[in-house]
Image (spheres, helix red, strand yellow):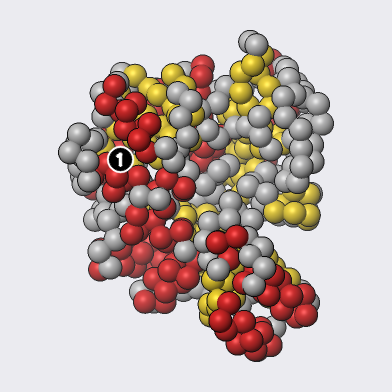
Amino acid sequence: MTILILGSGGREHTFAWKIAQSPLCKKLFVAPGNSGTAQIATNVDIKVTDFDAIKSLVLEHKIEMVVVGPEDPLVLGIHDFFLNDDTLKHVAVIGPQKAAAELEGSKEFAKEFLYRHNIPTAAYQSFNANNVEEGYKFLETLNAPYVLKADGLAAGKGVLILNDLAEAKAELKSMLLDAKFGDASKTVVIEEFLDGIELSCFVLTDGKNYKILPTAKDYKRIGEGDTGLNTGGMGAVSPVPFATEEFLNKIEERIVKPTISGLQKDNLPYKGFVFIGLIKVGDDPKVIEYNVRMGDPETEVVLPRLKTDLVDIFRAISEEKLNEIELEIDERAATTVMLVSGGYPEAYEKGMEITGLEHVKESIAFHAGATTKDGKIVTSGGRVMAITSYGNTYQEAIKKSYQNIDKLHFDKMNYRKDIGFDL
Protein backbone atom coordinates (compact mmCIF):
# COMPACT_ATOMS: atom_id res chain seq x y z
CA MET A 1 0.00 0.00 0.00
CA THR A 2 0.92 3.63 -0.47
CA ILE A 3 0.21 5.41 2.83
CA LEU A 4 0.01 9.06 3.92
CA ILE A 5 0.43 10.23 7.53
CA LEU A 6 -0.86 13.71 8.40
CA GLY A 7 1.06 15.69 11.03
CA SER A 8 4.53 16.89 12.00
CA GLY A 9 5.20 15.92 15.62
CA GLY A 10 6.81 13.14 17.61
CA ARG A 11 3.59 11.16 17.35
CA GLU A 12 3.77 11.22 13.54
CA HIS A 13 7.47 10.29 13.46
CA THR A 14 6.58 7.30 15.69
CA PHE A 15 3.74 6.32 13.34
CA ALA A 16 6.12 6.58 10.37
CA TRP A 17 8.80 4.54 12.16
CA LYS A 18 6.27 1.79 12.91
CA ILE A 19 4.51 1.81 9.52
CA ALA A 20 7.84 1.79 7.62
CA GLN A 21 8.62 -1.57 9.29
CA SER A 22 5.55 -3.19 7.68
CA PRO A 23 5.98 -5.33 4.57
CA LEU A 24 2.51 -4.05 3.59
CA CYS A 25 3.82 -0.49 3.20
CA LYS A 26 5.18 0.08 -0.31
CA LYS A 27 5.59 3.88 -0.16
CA LEU A 28 5.15 6.32 2.72
CA PHE A 29 4.37 10.04 2.65
CA VAL A 30 4.13 12.43 5.61
CA ALA A 31 2.52 15.87 5.38
CA PRO A 32 4.13 18.09 6.48
CA GLY A 33 6.48 15.81 8.50
CA ASN A 34 9.77 16.75 10.18
CA SER A 35 13.49 15.92 10.08
CA GLY A 36 12.82 12.46 11.53
CA THR A 37 10.13 11.44 9.06
CA ALA A 38 12.32 12.76 6.21
CA GLN A 39 14.79 9.93 6.93
CA ILE A 40 12.20 7.13 6.40
CA ALA A 41 9.46 8.67 4.24
CA THR A 42 8.76 11.42 1.72
CA ASN A 43 7.78 14.71 3.37
CA VAL A 44 5.29 16.91 1.52
CA ASP A 45 4.87 20.54 2.58
CA ILE A 46 1.08 20.59 3.00
CA LYS A 47 -0.93 21.84 6.00
CA VAL A 48 -2.98 19.13 7.74
CA THR A 49 -6.14 21.23 7.29
CA ASP A 50 -5.66 21.95 3.55
CA PHE A 51 -8.07 19.26 2.38
CA ASP A 52 -7.88 20.22 -1.33
CA ALA A 53 -4.08 19.94 -1.37
CA ILE A 54 -4.33 16.60 0.48
CA LYS A 55 -6.82 15.40 -2.16
CA SER A 56 -4.42 16.32 -4.98
CA LEU A 57 -1.57 14.49 -3.26
CA VAL A 58 -3.69 11.36 -2.68
CA LEU A 59 -4.85 11.23 -6.30
CA GLU A 60 -1.41 12.00 -7.77
CA HIS A 61 0.36 9.22 -5.84
CA LYS A 62 -2.57 6.75 -5.70
CA ILE A 63 -2.48 6.79 -1.90
CA GLU A 64 -4.68 4.03 -0.43
CA MET A 65 -4.64 4.89 3.28
CA VAL A 66 -4.51 8.15 5.25
CA VAL A 67 -3.53 8.05 8.93
CA VAL A 68 -4.57 11.25 10.70
CA GLY A 69 -2.21 12.25 13.53
CA PRO A 70 -3.58 15.49 15.09
CA GLU A 71 -7.10 16.44 16.12
CA ASP A 72 -7.70 19.54 13.96
CA PRO A 73 -8.37 17.79 10.62
CA LEU A 74 -10.62 15.24 12.36
CA VAL A 75 -12.71 17.90 14.11
CA LEU A 76 -12.93 19.78 10.78
CA GLY A 77 -14.23 16.61 9.09
CA ILE A 78 -11.43 15.21 6.91
CA HIS A 79 -12.93 11.69 7.07
CA ASP A 80 -16.29 13.04 5.82
CA PHE A 81 -14.45 15.00 3.08
CA PHE A 82 -13.05 11.69 1.76
CA LEU A 83 -16.36 9.81 2.05
CA ASN A 84 -18.28 12.55 0.22
CA ASP A 85 -15.88 12.63 -2.76
CA ASP A 86 -16.32 9.92 -5.42
CA THR A 87 -12.61 9.99 -6.30
CA LEU A 88 -11.56 9.55 -2.64
CA LYS A 89 -14.20 7.43 -0.94
CA HIS A 90 -12.28 4.16 -1.55
CA VAL A 91 -9.30 5.50 0.47
CA ALA A 92 -9.09 4.15 4.03
CA VAL A 93 -9.02 7.00 6.58
CA ILE A 94 -7.86 6.19 10.11
CA GLY A 95 -9.69 8.63 12.36
CA PRO A 96 -13.35 9.23 13.28
CA GLN A 97 -15.89 11.17 11.24
CA LYS A 98 -16.73 14.74 12.21
CA ALA A 99 -19.79 13.90 14.35
CA ALA A 100 -17.69 11.54 16.52
CA ALA A 101 -14.67 13.89 16.61
CA GLU A 102 -16.84 16.27 18.66
CA LEU A 103 -15.83 14.10 21.63
CA GLU A 104 -12.61 16.10 21.51
CA GLY A 105 -13.92 19.15 19.65
CA SER A 106 -16.36 20.03 22.44
CA LYS A 107 -15.88 19.39 26.17
CA GLU A 108 -19.63 19.93 26.69
CA PHE A 109 -20.48 17.31 24.02
CA ALA A 110 -18.08 14.85 25.71
CA LYS A 111 -19.60 15.43 29.18
CA GLU A 112 -23.13 14.93 27.80
CA PHE A 113 -21.98 11.67 26.16
CA LEU A 114 -20.42 10.46 29.43
CA TYR A 115 -23.57 11.25 31.43
CA ARG A 116 -25.90 9.75 28.82
CA HIS A 117 -24.04 6.43 28.88
CA ASN A 118 -23.47 6.36 32.67
CA ILE A 119 -19.69 6.47 32.34
CA PRO A 120 -17.99 7.65 35.58
CA THR A 121 -16.77 11.26 35.36
CA ALA A 122 -16.70 14.48 37.42
CA ALA A 123 -19.93 16.41 38.10
CA TYR A 124 -20.15 19.50 35.86
CA GLN A 125 -22.23 22.35 34.44
CA SER A 126 -21.57 24.46 31.34
CA PHE A 127 -22.00 28.21 30.90
CA ASN A 128 -21.84 30.89 28.21
CA ALA A 129 -21.85 34.70 28.02
CA ASN A 130 -25.59 34.80 28.78
CA ASN A 131 -25.41 33.07 32.16
CA VAL A 132 -22.08 34.11 33.69
CA GLU A 133 -23.80 34.99 36.99
CA GLU A 134 -25.12 31.43 37.26
CA GLY A 135 -21.55 30.25 36.66
CA TYR A 136 -20.40 32.32 39.66
CA LYS A 137 -23.15 30.74 41.78
CA PHE A 138 -22.16 27.22 40.66
CA LEU A 139 -18.53 27.92 41.60
CA GLU A 140 -19.74 28.93 45.09
CA THR A 141 -21.30 25.46 45.55
CA LEU A 142 -17.97 23.72 44.85
CA ASN A 143 -14.91 23.23 47.05
CA ALA A 144 -11.51 24.38 45.83
CA PRO A 145 -9.69 23.72 43.60
CA TYR A 146 -11.95 24.90 40.75
CA VAL A 147 -11.67 23.37 37.27
CA LEU A 148 -12.56 25.55 34.23
CA LYS A 149 -12.40 24.06 30.74
CA ALA A 150 -12.79 25.94 27.45
CA ASP A 151 -15.34 23.95 25.46
CA GLY A 152 -13.46 24.00 22.12
CA LEU A 153 -9.95 23.17 20.95
CA ALA A 154 -7.38 25.43 22.62
CA ALA A 155 -4.19 23.51 21.73
CA GLY A 156 -4.11 21.83 25.13
CA LYS A 157 -4.05 25.19 26.94
CA GLY A 158 -7.77 25.61 27.68
CA VAL A 159 -7.96 24.01 31.13
CA LEU A 160 -7.46 26.06 34.30
CA ILE A 161 -7.24 24.65 37.85
CA LEU A 162 -7.50 27.41 40.44
CA ASN A 163 -7.45 27.39 44.24
CA ASP A 164 -9.04 30.80 44.85
CA LEU A 165 -12.78 31.41 44.34
CA ALA A 166 -12.38 35.07 43.37
CA GLU A 167 -9.68 34.15 40.84
CA ALA A 168 -11.92 31.37 39.43
CA LYS A 169 -14.75 33.90 38.95
CA ALA A 170 -12.38 36.38 37.28
CA GLU A 171 -11.04 33.68 34.93
CA LEU A 172 -14.59 32.55 34.06
CA LYS A 173 -15.43 36.14 33.12
CA SER A 174 -12.19 36.42 31.10
CA MET A 175 -12.96 33.21 29.20
CA LEU A 176 -16.63 33.96 28.46
CA LEU A 177 -16.71 37.74 28.07
CA ASP A 178 -13.15 38.64 27.03
CA ALA A 179 -12.64 35.56 24.79
CA LYS A 180 -9.44 34.53 26.62
CA PHE A 181 -9.22 31.42 24.38
CA GLY A 182 -11.06 32.94 21.40
CA ASP A 183 -14.00 30.92 20.05
CA ALA A 184 -12.85 27.91 22.10
CA SER A 185 -14.14 29.55 25.31
CA LYS A 186 -17.56 30.72 24.04
CA THR A 187 -18.80 27.93 26.30
CA VAL A 188 -16.98 26.96 29.51
CA VAL A 189 -17.41 23.70 31.40
CA ILE A 190 -16.96 23.96 35.19
CA GLU A 191 -16.20 20.63 36.88
CA GLU A 192 -15.73 19.29 40.37
CA PHE A 193 -12.04 18.63 41.05
CA LEU A 194 -11.09 14.96 41.18
CA ASP A 195 -8.16 14.11 43.44
CA GLY A 196 -6.06 11.18 42.26
CA ILE A 197 -3.34 10.05 39.86
CA GLU A 198 -3.82 10.30 36.10
CA LEU A 199 -3.18 7.81 33.33
CA SER A 200 -4.17 7.31 29.70
CA CYS A 201 -6.02 4.41 28.09
CA PHE A 202 -5.81 3.94 24.31
CA VAL A 203 -8.43 2.00 22.41
CA LEU A 204 -8.57 1.07 18.73
CA THR A 205 -12.03 0.64 17.23
CA ASP A 206 -13.55 -0.10 13.82
CA GLY A 207 -16.91 1.20 15.08
CA LYS A 208 -18.06 -2.21 16.31
CA ASN A 209 -15.05 -4.09 17.68
CA TYR A 210 -12.30 -2.72 19.89
CA LYS A 211 -8.79 -3.54 21.08
CA ILE A 212 -7.10 -1.96 24.09
CA LEU A 213 -3.51 -0.80 23.63
CA PRO A 214 -0.97 -0.59 26.49
CA THR A 215 -1.64 2.07 29.13
CA ALA A 216 0.68 5.06 29.54
CA LYS A 217 1.15 7.97 31.90
CA ASP A 218 2.44 11.31 30.66
CA TYR A 219 3.84 14.31 32.52
CA LYS A 220 2.26 17.61 31.52
CA ARG A 221 3.97 20.23 33.69
CA ILE A 222 7.19 21.93 32.63
CA GLY A 223 8.83 21.72 36.09
CA GLU A 224 10.15 18.89 38.20
CA GLY A 225 7.69 17.47 40.74
CA ASP A 226 4.82 18.39 38.38
CA THR A 227 5.17 22.14 38.94
CA GLY A 228 4.92 25.14 36.65
CA LEU A 229 2.97 25.63 33.44
CA ASN A 230 1.15 22.97 31.47
CA THR A 231 2.84 21.75 28.27
CA GLY A 232 1.92 19.33 25.50
CA GLY A 233 3.76 16.68 27.55
CA MET A 234 7.32 16.33 28.89
CA GLY A 235 7.66 12.54 28.98
CA ALA A 236 5.76 9.29 29.38
CA VAL A 237 5.96 5.80 30.86
CA SER A 238 4.30 2.54 29.69
CA PRO A 239 2.90 0.37 31.19
CA VAL A 240 1.53 2.25 34.21
CA PRO A 241 2.85 0.38 37.28
CA PHE A 242 -0.22 1.08 39.48
CA ALA A 243 -2.67 -0.18 36.82
CA THR A 244 -3.24 -3.67 38.23
CA GLU A 245 -5.22 -6.34 36.40
CA GLU A 246 -8.21 -5.62 38.62
CA PHE A 247 -8.02 -1.88 37.86
CA LEU A 248 -7.62 -2.51 34.10
CA ASN A 249 -10.68 -4.74 34.27
CA LYS A 250 -12.68 -1.85 35.83
CA ILE A 251 -11.51 0.43 33.00
CA GLU A 252 -12.68 -2.03 30.36
CA GLU A 253 -16.05 -2.85 31.95
CA ARG A 254 -17.04 0.61 33.23
CA ILE A 255 -15.46 2.86 30.60
CA VAL A 256 -14.26 1.19 27.38
CA LYS A 257 -17.29 -1.04 26.72
CA PRO A 258 -19.92 1.68 27.39
CA THR A 259 -17.87 4.13 25.29
CA ILE A 260 -17.79 1.85 22.23
CA SER A 261 -21.47 0.86 22.61
CA GLY A 262 -22.32 4.55 23.19
CA LEU A 263 -20.72 5.46 19.85
CA GLN A 264 -22.97 2.89 18.15
CA LYS A 265 -26.14 3.94 20.03
CA ASP A 266 -25.55 7.61 19.22
CA ASN A 267 -24.68 6.80 15.59
CA LEU A 268 -21.20 8.35 15.84
CA PRO A 269 -19.12 6.73 13.05
CA TYR A 270 -15.69 5.87 14.44
CA LYS A 271 -12.67 4.18 12.87
CA GLY A 272 -9.48 4.96 14.71
CA PHE A 273 -8.01 5.70 18.12
CA VAL A 274 -10.01 6.63 21.21
CA PHE A 275 -7.72 8.22 23.81
CA ILE A 276 -9.37 8.17 27.24
CA GLY A 277 -7.79 10.46 29.82
CA LEU A 278 -8.43 8.83 33.20
CA ILE A 279 -7.92 9.57 36.87
CA LYS A 280 -7.68 6.91 39.57
CA VAL A 281 -9.77 8.14 42.51
CA GLY A 282 -9.36 5.67 45.37
CA ASP A 283 -9.53 2.36 43.50
CA ASP A 284 -11.88 3.56 40.77
CA PRO A 285 -11.25 5.01 37.31
CA LYS A 286 -13.10 8.14 36.15
CA VAL A 287 -12.93 9.87 32.77
CA ILE A 288 -11.33 13.32 32.63
CA GLU A 289 -11.56 13.71 28.85
CA TYR A 290 -11.70 12.01 25.47
CA ASN A 291 -9.30 12.68 22.62
CA VAL A 292 -10.00 11.28 19.16
CA ARG A 293 -6.40 10.49 18.23
CA MET A 294 -3.25 9.17 19.89
CA GLY A 295 -1.59 11.26 22.58
CA ASP A 296 1.85 12.79 22.27
CA PRO A 297 4.28 11.81 23.93
CA GLU A 298 2.32 8.67 24.87
CA THR A 299 2.52 7.40 21.27
CA GLU A 300 6.30 7.32 21.67
CA VAL A 301 5.98 4.69 24.43
CA VAL A 302 2.81 2.83 23.35
CA LEU A 303 3.64 2.07 19.68
CA PRO A 304 7.19 0.84 20.40
CA ARG A 305 5.59 -1.81 22.68
CA LEU A 306 3.21 -2.98 19.95
CA LYS A 307 4.69 -5.99 18.12
CA THR A 308 1.73 -6.49 15.74
CA ASP A 309 2.02 -4.99 12.24
CA LEU A 310 0.36 -1.55 12.48
CA VAL A 311 -0.68 -1.49 8.81
CA ASP A 312 -2.40 -4.85 9.31
CA ILE A 313 -4.31 -3.34 12.25
CA PHE A 314 -5.30 -0.23 10.27
CA ARG A 315 -6.47 -2.36 7.34
CA ALA A 316 -8.62 -4.42 9.74
CA ILE A 317 -10.09 -1.19 11.13
CA SER A 318 -11.00 0.09 7.66
CA GLU A 319 -12.64 -3.27 6.80
CA GLU A 320 -14.41 -3.53 10.21
CA LYS A 321 -12.52 -6.76 10.96
CA LEU A 322 -10.61 -5.65 14.05
CA ASN A 323 -11.96 -8.70 15.90
CA GLU A 324 -9.77 -10.87 13.63
CA ILE A 325 -6.54 -9.24 14.86
CA GLU A 326 -4.60 -10.37 17.94
CA LEU A 327 -2.45 -7.67 19.51
CA GLU A 328 1.01 -8.81 20.56
CA ILE A 329 2.59 -6.54 23.18
CA ASP A 330 6.26 -6.31 24.18
CA GLU A 331 6.51 -7.19 27.88
CA ARG A 332 9.28 -4.64 28.41
CA ALA A 333 8.61 -1.16 29.74
CA ALA A 334 9.13 1.86 27.50
CA THR A 335 9.82 5.42 28.62
CA THR A 336 10.33 8.67 26.78
CA VAL A 337 11.77 12.04 27.80
CA MET A 338 10.94 15.17 25.80
CA LEU A 339 13.70 17.65 25.01
CA VAL A 340 12.23 21.15 24.71
CA SER A 341 13.37 24.61 23.66
CA GLY A 342 14.44 27.01 26.41
CA GLY A 343 11.48 29.21 27.38
CA TYR A 344 8.83 26.67 26.28
CA PRO A 345 5.84 26.60 26.89
CA GLU A 346 6.17 30.39 26.68
CA ALA A 347 8.25 32.26 24.07
CA TYR A 348 11.27 30.37 22.72
CA GLU A 349 13.74 30.68 19.84
CA LYS A 350 13.92 28.34 16.84
CA GLY A 351 16.70 27.31 14.47
CA MET A 352 19.15 25.90 17.06
CA GLU A 353 21.37 23.14 15.64
CA ILE A 354 20.88 19.72 17.28
CA THR A 355 24.10 17.72 17.64
CA GLY A 356 25.04 14.27 18.91
CA LEU A 357 22.23 12.24 17.33
CA GLU A 358 24.74 9.85 15.76
CA HIS A 359 25.95 8.89 19.26
CA VAL A 360 22.52 7.74 20.53
CA LYS A 361 22.69 4.01 21.33
CA GLU A 362 19.91 1.75 22.72
CA SER A 363 17.39 4.60 22.53
CA ILE A 364 15.20 5.88 19.70
CA ALA A 365 15.17 9.62 19.00
CA PHE A 366 11.70 10.56 17.75
CA HIS A 367 11.85 14.01 16.17
CA ALA A 368 9.05 16.47 16.98
CA GLY A 369 9.76 20.19 16.57
CA ALA A 370 12.83 19.62 14.39
CA THR A 371 13.52 20.23 10.73
CA THR A 372 16.41 19.95 8.25
CA LYS A 373 18.07 23.19 7.13
CA ASP A 374 21.23 23.37 5.01
CA GLY A 375 21.96 19.72 5.79
CA LYS A 376 21.71 20.27 9.54
CA ILE A 377 18.92 19.25 11.93
CA VAL A 378 17.64 22.34 13.75
CA THR A 379 14.86 23.11 16.24
CA SER A 380 11.54 24.30 14.78
CA GLY A 381 9.15 24.00 17.74
CA GLY A 382 8.78 23.98 21.52
CA ARG A 383 8.91 20.23 21.99
CA VAL A 384 11.93 19.22 19.94
CA MET A 385 12.62 15.52 20.41
CA ALA A 386 11.43 12.50 22.41
CA ILE A 387 14.10 10.04 23.56
CA THR A 388 12.50 6.59 23.97
CA SER A 389 14.08 3.52 25.58
CA TYR A 390 13.09 -0.01 26.55
CA GLY A 391 13.91 -1.70 29.84
CA ASN A 392 12.88 -4.67 31.98
CA THR A 393 11.58 -2.02 34.40
CA TYR A 394 10.60 1.59 33.74
CA GLN A 395 13.54 2.64 35.97
CA GLU A 396 15.98 0.81 33.69
CA ALA A 397 14.36 2.31 30.58
CA ILE A 398 14.40 5.84 31.95
CA LYS A 399 18.08 5.51 32.89
CA LYS A 400 18.92 4.66 29.26
CA SER A 401 16.98 7.69 27.99
CA TYR A 402 18.88 10.02 30.34
CA GLN A 403 22.24 8.44 29.42
CA ASN A 404 21.54 9.17 25.76
CA ILE A 405 20.25 12.68 26.44
CA ASP A 406 23.72 13.43 27.84
CA LYS A 407 25.07 12.93 24.30
CA LEU A 408 22.66 15.43 22.73
CA HIS A 409 22.89 19.20 22.60
CA PHE A 410 21.17 22.28 21.30
CA ASP A 411 21.30 25.82 22.67
CA LYS A 412 19.05 26.29 25.76
CA MET A 413 17.95 22.61 25.68
CA ASN A 414 15.62 21.82 28.59
CA TYR A 415 14.03 18.60 29.89
CA ARG A 416 12.58 17.14 33.07
CA LYS A 417 14.99 15.03 35.05
CA ASP A 418 12.30 13.27 37.10
CA ILE A 419 10.02 11.42 34.64
CA GLY A 420 8.45 8.52 36.55
CA PHE A 421 9.18 10.18 39.93
CA ASP A 422 5.68 9.53 41.32
CA LEU A 423 5.48 5.83 40.46
Which x, y percent locates residue 216?
54, 49
Amino acid beneath label 1: Val
Q: Specify whether 7 is left or right of 224.
A: left
The image quarter in which residue 119 lies: bottom left
Q: Nearer the viewer, residue 330 or 75?
A: 75
Toward the top, the furthest residue is: 375
Q: Is residue 360 above or below residue 190?
A: above
The image quarter in which residue 176 lies: bottom right
Is disc 1 placed on a helix, strand or loop? Answer: strand
Which x, y percent locates residue 215?
50, 50
Q: Is residue 334 above or below residue 58?
A: below
How many numbered discs sit on the rendered protein? Answer: 1
Q: How crowded is mark 1: few (under 14 residues within 10 Å), some or many (20 or more)?
A: many
Please tell me which residue is depicted at 69% across the width and 38% down the height of the picture.
382
Q: In this view, does 202 lie above or below 390?
A: below
Which x, y percent locates residue 235?
65, 43
Q: Specify whether 207 is left or right of 385.
A: left
**Residue 211 visible to an observer of this rendering:** no
The image quarter in which residue 193 lies: bottom right
Q: Which quadrant, please, contains the N terminus?
A: top left
Q: Nearer the viewer, residue 266 or 129?
A: 129
Toward the right, the furthest residue is: 412
**Residue 275 visible to an observer of this rendering:** yes
The residue that disc 1 covers is 93
Which x, y percent locates residue 64?
26, 29
Please tell me which residue is depicted at 50% across the width and 66% down the height of the picture.
107
Please tell me which residue is depicted at 57% across the width and 71% down the height of the picture.
188
Please tell me which residue is depicted at 72% across the width and 17% down the height of the picture.
356
Q: In this view, does 178 lie above or below 269?
A: below
Q: Which of 314 and 98 is in front in this view?
A: 98
